[in-house]
Image (cartoon, rainbow, N blue to C red):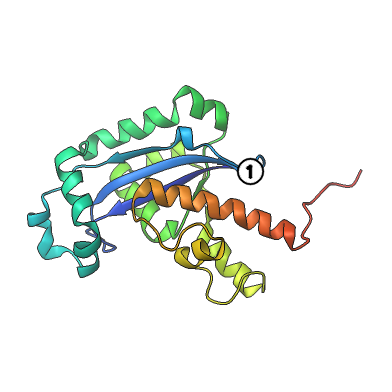
């Protein structure tokens, strides 16, 4: 498999009660070393006002995501409309042409900790099972493995360290589309790094 849907979410926190406020998706082609940024999409999902949410928010969220929460409150689509938005995207002509008959395999960071539980909470398990492959490619898990294997320097499994290691940016922008694009870039750079280390692609002997 070389085709992935890089996905990232932004939320009002990491706790179980947190709300989804932004989602972005962008297709990535590992075989062709391409990020199809022209097919990247981002959507805001409506939430209560910042003033209502503030007592439940962490200091980090208050400091870094106030503007995004205010924007989601004023400009976001309803949580009920989000399923329709995502289904329309996945079934659009160009996205269907890219993935063919395969369900997209999600690529991202810490997918099992936040993104997938949040999506499942908002969309339901039936929607997730119908539209996405059950495998995922978690870049932070891959990074941890490559640290253990001695291919990456120690403590380079986090997103911020991987971005710096590949000279992509000094820190994350913490918007869903920016993070989804970053994950795609890190994935392509990891593939390139493996080739530079002399790890040759598998070929079936005839």
Image-based side of 111 in relation to 120, left or right: right
Residue closest to the far left = 51
Quadrant where the N terminus is found in the figure: top right
Dot 1: element: loop
Q: Measured along the vertical axis of the image, is residue 146 above or below residue 179?
A: below
Quadrant where the C terminus is found in the figure: top right
Image-based side of 87 in relation to 152, left or right: left
Where in the figure is residue 21, as x and y percent of width and height?
A: 25, 48
Q: Measured along the vertical axis of the image, is residue 96 above or below residue 150?
A: above
Q: Can the viewer see residue 136?
A: no
Residue closest to the far right = 206
Residue of label 1: 33
Report the residue at 38% width, 43% height from top.
24
Quarter assignment of residue 186: bottom right
* Viewer-proximal residue among 30 and 134: 30
Report the residue at 32% width, 32% height from top.
85
Where in the figure is residue 191, as x and y percent of width and height?
A: 65, 54
* Viewer-proximal residue among 7 and 104: 7
Label 1, residues with CA under 10 Å away: few <14, some 14-19, many ≥20: some
Image-based side of 90 in relation to 11, left or right: right
User: How many labels, in total?
Assistant: 1
Q: Measured along the vertical axis of the image, is residue 130 above or below residue 187?
A: above
Report the residue at 53% width, 44% height from top.
105
* Viewer-proximal residue among 146 and 134: 146
Where in the figure is residue 91, as x and y percent of width and height?
A: 44, 27
Where in the figure is residue 16, as x and y percent of width and height?
A: 26, 61
Q: Can the viewer see residue 115?
A: yes
Residue closest to the far top = 93
Image-based side of 195 in relation to 160, left or right: right
């Amino acid at each position: 498999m070389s085709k992935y849907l890089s996905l990232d979410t932004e939320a009002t926190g990491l706790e179980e009660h947190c709300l989804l406020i932004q989602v972005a998706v962008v297709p990535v082609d590992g075989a062709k070393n391409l990020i199809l940024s022209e097919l990247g999409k981002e959507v805001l999902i409506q939430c209560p006002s910042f003033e209502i949410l503030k007592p439940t928010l962490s200091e980090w969220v208050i400091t870094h995501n106030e503007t995004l929460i205010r924007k989601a409150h004023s400009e976001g689509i309803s949580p009920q409309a989000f399923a329709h938005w995502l289904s329309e995207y996945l079934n659009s002509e160009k996205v269907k042409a890219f993935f063919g008959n395969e369900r997209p395999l999600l690529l991202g960071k810490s997918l099992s900790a936040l993104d997938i539980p949040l999506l499942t909470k908002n969309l339901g398990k039936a929607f997730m099972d119908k539209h996405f492959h059950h495998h995922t490619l978690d870049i932070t898990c891959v990074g941890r493995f490559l640290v253990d294997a001695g291919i990456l320097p120690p403590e380079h499994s986090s997103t911020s360290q991987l971005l710096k290691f590949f000279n992509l940016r000094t820190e994350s922008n913490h918007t869903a589309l920016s993070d989804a694009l970053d994950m795609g870039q890190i994935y392509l750079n990891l593939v390139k790094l493996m080739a530079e280390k002399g790890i040759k692609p598998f070929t079936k002997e005839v």
